[in-house]
Image (tube, coloured by chain):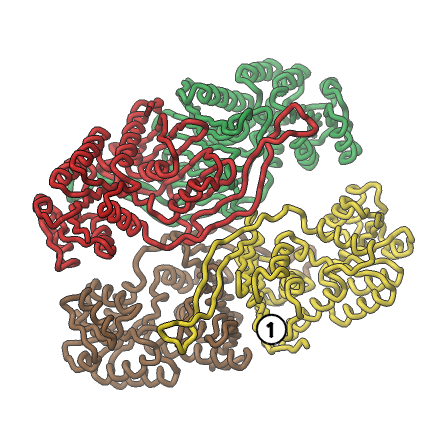
Chain colours: A yellow, B brown, C red, D green
């Protein structure tokens, strides 16, 4: 049974504590938050859990195995470094850190202390993304041609990050899971139509070896919420709509193939193939519970989780480059 | 009553002849096509119309007022120039020409011969786009912030043009109608995952003065057909779905505004406004009939149509620049 | 090659002539209509077809094989009887006749003259219904439990028939195709909220042997158009939405089964099964073309079509009983 | 501040306790449940609430103002009677009782003891139904013509009641709210295709004075969940889809009107009117919280709630008659 100390009891913290306590192999010993009213809430909700102000209490207690970090991203690096130095495993909310340099240091520290870092890219643990990844792993789509994601809604404007860091991060984690190689370059365009606010509209394009291309449209300024991705392969294509209650994934047996036109034998013609559509049953398990179970198994069995420190580093590195591209008017940034 | 000679009786020609004959102020005197089987079809369908092989017959007949050009785009320029020189008005399918230089020459020739060029950017004449343009003209959306269009489907791969020329052209014509000023620069990314075929996936971004930004995702490789645009203003936002049978336009009384947070008086906060959604009734008139009526009125009354030679030139110039950007890996191309 | 004489060139007549002429094994020799402006239209559209006022010309011409009847339903019986007596096959629009007694006489006359009657229950020839019928014929749904159809829209109010005769007729034809036995009784409730107009809202329930039940909600007073049927079997269930452009049929691998609850061994519990959903590819063939091809084959090969005179009689008989039930406030009418 | 004693801590009880504790004018003093594991759960969740086995403890405590009953329906009557006799107000889950005779007795007892009965027909307190009721109260729809509800899904089969008592009860409560007069008769058809189980498919029709008609299709055997009602008036029509996340209500400015056709002056023709559609903003308040606030105000201020004992009696009376009709094969049951 892993004992957790959770730092940060804001928006996400209560979910985390609930799921860590519900999971078979973990429980929460400490909740830490600097704000009085959040500590009071934690005390009311979990009378038997220690609720403290100073995170060093958690680090000092040998009965704590894992530090879970659910604080603003600017503090992730410092807290993760301290936790690793104290010999704890780290369960950290996405993104891993605010800069790739910080991420690199955390990864090195984890290696040096022989501890494990789990980055909570929750979307990777949804049953829908798991199913998509399985299909791709099993070559059901053929060679991947494109990933196109629309991730838009009205608000919420974040104070500390722009829309790239807030929303595109999810697609980067999903792409890390379903592609074999990291992108080779990135371009981003960002618009900031609300004065004195972070960029709220972004178009991020990722280039890969071969023909695969990925594109993400993220916005805090859409009148409707859309969470839709088109994923195309040479054999099949997927429409993934995360807002669909029961048919999140539709697999189209459609494709394009080059055919020899007998009438014009010199030329290759494009032919179309169109078959059935299948919407596979998706288990109704909660993504955060899947993530916690996977993290717990990784900590206990000493293996690297799917979304480990390196994953977190890759994602932060691309976010950083995308931001840099956006600042430079869409210049293509090399990632190799 | 305007007498038309129609050159080209392929995919679009029959529609054109039907609507020109149905319209109150026009009729078709000639149909011209180089292909035997298309001429035979025209003769069967319109026994009283002259069906000829050589377009010069149409140009030589003083009883022809307008030459309608529905041939492949590479021939538009030559046919339009000859028609204008022969003193005819020109009704030409989109895009106006294959290059901006050709478009410039056609515009000049029209001016020199005092004839009128109508470019059939049909989408501009749909009742849905007319309603959107009215709303914007009447300041119902406030200041425009963005236009985001998804225009994807499976196929058809074109032989003579890529997906930018095939699909993005529609959005450029719509943008020309609803914006006061042309874009100042363009960036395009295009992918060509099917070997030896034109680019079939494209992302085109248009930059304008002030904060307005436009983006078009066009693809021939999507498993589902999508024709959706999000149009955001400071006061209201629109979702325009051209595939919706009865509710093509939804106007959301939603917005973002900066508010002074009394608790933190030094800082501006982002506030959200959310009201009713209205889907206005759209008349069921055929877009091509609207276009023909508008063209006929322009020719007869000697006024410039909404989609005139200059419009056609602007659209071709941007298509050309977008293509150039795509060839150069997404470099931003200045349009001023 | 079958030669048709078509009586009635109103709303449906032009479609019929177009498809009969396009089909491989038929062509239209005559069009007959009593109204001057409809004959003029027919002459313009089909210069080489004989256009006449008196249907007896068609009956008298030995070169006519089939009489197609596309006139108001009150005239179907008389025209069909004359055509059969003249030795012609009959292709008649739905419903076969205005009363079951008339339908019975037509069936008898067809038997006596050894001619074939085809009733154009077009829906039965849609690719979607064909697929559904195939699935049921192949026991893919298991035992049928229910058929529930919603067939509503705004208008059009018919002058000669109420909403049962106008809309429910389609479901009766589909049910005739997919069930092995006719219904044993019928109940109908109809409402007529618009003064002096036919009933415009109807709920028709059909009872069958065993547990199968069918229900149709038909209305001319719905703000939205709905064409949706739920079809449930013990093994699978179907949602059939005729307005869906590409996914008209969804087959759910869902069901209910009785299971022994080990904890309460005395009682049977209801268990649920939930698997994938499959939306099969539907061919894009036009239903009327399918119907004409099937009718032509039946006439030429001397076999009974799927929607033959007996089918037409059954449907009219049920419509008549449903009307009777509605007039009597929903009393159950025996059909055996 | 009203003190509640809650009897029954099963499926709905925990929600009730949470909301009663959160509401401004109420708190929960007791939770009562006969089952050990439910009491243990209650103790863990609410350490400061008294958790007891015998409901008579609640009745005996003068500090308890209201008894909330969330037990199986067969026990409602007995518990409500005891609570009223003990001088408590009653907050009872729907339906009020298992028979109309029981309901009548509860209403009489409430009158005799001068206490108030609130029946938790929660749907009436959804923001969507509140908006619909407001529109109807304000004559925005004109004269009501019909209410047509489809309330279907797969499972859950109930052990104690059939699908009429489980699902149609919601529509009866909504209809009670939006109609001025109760129905005059009811017909119901129910099917029970799963052996030895309650009826799982039902069609219930309610007849009213004038032309208004209501119909409910309820089923536990549908592969998809549908919660849709069409509500038609002479001036406007509503589509209410309770599963739509953001546009639950669509108000169509559509209608049918009788017009004098100038060409045929003797006859009234049906004309159609079609205008904009408006989807009003719906507040995101929880229905149960609305219900509790309204109940608390009713108890404290001594006024009758919207869903009072009489409402509960009317609903039970119609459920009973619908059941009776279904047992008799759909015979129409008089309700006057």
Q: Is residue B255 visible?
A: no
Q: Residues within 10 Å of mark 1 (few under 14, many from 20)?
A: many
> In the figure, residue C326 lies in which quadrant?
top left
Q: Please state which of residues A28 and C138 is positioned toward the viewer in this rendering.
A: C138
> In the figure, residue A180 lies in which quadrant?
bottom right
Q: Position of residue B284 (x, y in %)?
A: 32, 55
Q: Please state which of residues B222 and D269 is positioned toward the viewer in this rendering.
A: B222
Q: Relative to residue C127, is residue A203 depicted above or below? A: below
- Marks counted in the figure total 1
Q: Position of residue A282 (x, y in %)?
A: 60, 48
Element under disc 1: strand
Q: Position of residue D46 (x, y in %)?
A: 76, 34
Residue bearing the label numbered 1? A207
At horizontal 48% and vertical 21% (from top left) the residue drawn is: D323
The subunit letter for the residue under badge 1 reads: A
Give the left or right position of residue C183, taking residue B237 as reference: left
At horizontal 39% and vertical 38% (from top left) the residue drawn is: C178
Q: Relative to residue B59, is residue A91 depicted above or below? A: above
Give the left or right position of residue D116, taking residue C158 as reference: right
Give the left or right position of residue A285, taking residue C208 as reference: right
Q: Please state which of residues B47 and C260 is positioned toward the viewer in this rendering.
A: C260
At horizontal 38% and vertical 45% (from top left) the residue drawn is: C129
Q: Is residue A264 visible?
A: yes
Q: Position of residue C200 (x, y in %)?
A: 31, 35
> In the figure, residue B260 lies in which quadrant?
bottom right
At horizontal 24% and vertical 49% (from top left) the residue drawn is: C296
């Amino acid at each position: 049974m892993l004992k957790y100390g959770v730092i940060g009891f804001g928006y996400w913290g209560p979910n985390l504590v609930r799921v860590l306590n519900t999971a078979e192999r973990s429980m929460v010993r400490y909740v830490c938050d600097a704000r009085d009213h959040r500590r009071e809430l934690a005390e009311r909700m979990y009378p038997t859990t220690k609720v403290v102000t100073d995170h060093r209490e958690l680090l000092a207690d040998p009965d704590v195995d894992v530090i879970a970090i659910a604080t603003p991203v600017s503090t992730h690096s410092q807290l993760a470094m301290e936790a690793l130095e104290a010999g704890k495993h780290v369960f950290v909310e996405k993104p891993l850190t605010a800069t790739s340099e910080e991420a690199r240091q955390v990864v090195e520290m984890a290696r040096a202390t022989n501890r494990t870092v789990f980055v909570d890219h929750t979307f990777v643990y949804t049953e829908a993304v798991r199913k998509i990844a399985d299909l791709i792993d099993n070559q059901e789509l053929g060679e991947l041609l494109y990933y196109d994601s629309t991730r838009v809604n009205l608000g919420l404007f974040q104070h500390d990050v722009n829309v790239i860091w807030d929303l595109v991060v999810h697609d980067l984690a999903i792409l890390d899971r379903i592609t074999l190689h990291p992108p080779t370059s990135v371009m981003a365009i960002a618009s900031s139509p609300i004065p004195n606010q972070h960029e709220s509209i972004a178009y991020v394009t990722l280039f890969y070896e071969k023909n695969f291309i990925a594109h993400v449209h993220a916005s805090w300024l859409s009148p409707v919420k859309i969470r839709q991705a088109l994923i195309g392969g040479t054999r099949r294509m997927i429409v993934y709509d995360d807002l669909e209650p029961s048919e999140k994934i539709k697999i189209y047996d459609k494709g394009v193939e080059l055919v020899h036109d007998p009438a014009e034998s010199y030329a290759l013609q494009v032919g179309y193939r169109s078959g059935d559509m299948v919407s596979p049953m998706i288990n109704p398990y909660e993504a955060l519970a899947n993530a916690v179970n996977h993290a717990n198994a990784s900590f206990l069995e000493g293996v690297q989780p799917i979304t480990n420190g390196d994953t977190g580093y890759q994602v932060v590195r691309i976010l950083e480059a995308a931001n840099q591209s956006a600042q430079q008017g869409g210049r293509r940034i090399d990632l190799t």
